[in-house]
Amino acid sequence: MALLGALVTWFGMVEAPLPQAVEHDTAFVPMWRLLVMGAAVLPVIGLASPLAGLELAATRRLRSMQRLYLAGLGIGSAVIFLGISALTTQPAVVAIMARGWMGWFGLALVAGAVLGWRLAWTLPSVVAVVLWYWGFGGNDQYRWWEFSARPYDDVPSLVLSAALLAVGLAAYAATPWRRRRLLFWR
């Protein structure tokens, strides 16, 4: 996280050319938007374990340690990443980065719960392609659902990021034995 934060301080405002659905040939996206997604996905990928079969029948102690690991690594990495980024980045951009981090972290939790922790990067990557290609609405405005680029005080983007985080936490909490119980009540 310290390395990603340092990359934001050095190269965060450099704009990378990415294709977008706009009238211009090429649009540019600041590198900090790419690095925030990486910083949010890395703690979730850290849940990958060679003992996946054990996780299916995990005891309370293993599950509580896994929750503690995810909470500590998630919050700690966000604090380190955003703290280092705040050294040279404007406060408004750091607020946008924090909001984006919440959304990407939630999407990574959903992908990890569904596809496995090693593939937690897949859903955020697919959503990023959609956001970065179709998220720009023209007239220097991003669409309301582009939570990683709207102004720092944009309420719909904050609500969307919080909802993505809540869905991700719910997907993480839906352990295999809880899912079986829910299917039993159907």
Image (cartoon, helix red, strand yellow):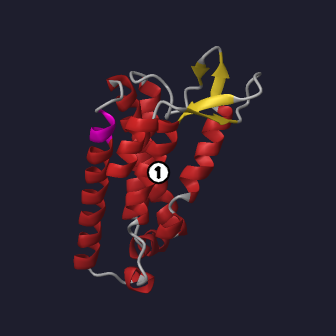
8 horizontally vs 139: left or right: left
Q: Using the image as rendered, state which of residue 26 and residue 49 is in the foreground.
A: 26
Q: Is residue 31 magenta?
A: no
Q: Position of residue 68 (x, y in %)?
A: 23, 64
* Crowd tier of the residue under label 1, counting other residues whose Cα lies within 10 Å: few below 14, some 14–19, many 20 or above: some
- Asked if residue 174 shows in the view, the reply is yes
Q: Which residue corresponds to the image point at 24% horizontal and 71% vertical from the top-left?
A: 65
Amino acid identity at mark 1: Gly
Q: Position of residue 161 (x, y in %)?
A: 43, 39
Q: Which residue corresponds to the image point at 52% horizontal and 42% vertical from the top-left?
A: 34
Residue 18, located in which quarter of the rendered image?
top right
Looking at the image, the residue that sits furthest to the front is 10
Residue annotated with mark 1: 38
Q: Element under label 1?
A: helix
Which residues, given as a range, are shown in magenta?
Answer: 82-86
Q: Position of residue 141 (x, y in %)?
A: 59, 19
63 horizontally vs 132: left or right: left
Q: Position of residue 1 (x, y in %)?
A: 34, 52
45 horizontally vs 121: left or right: left
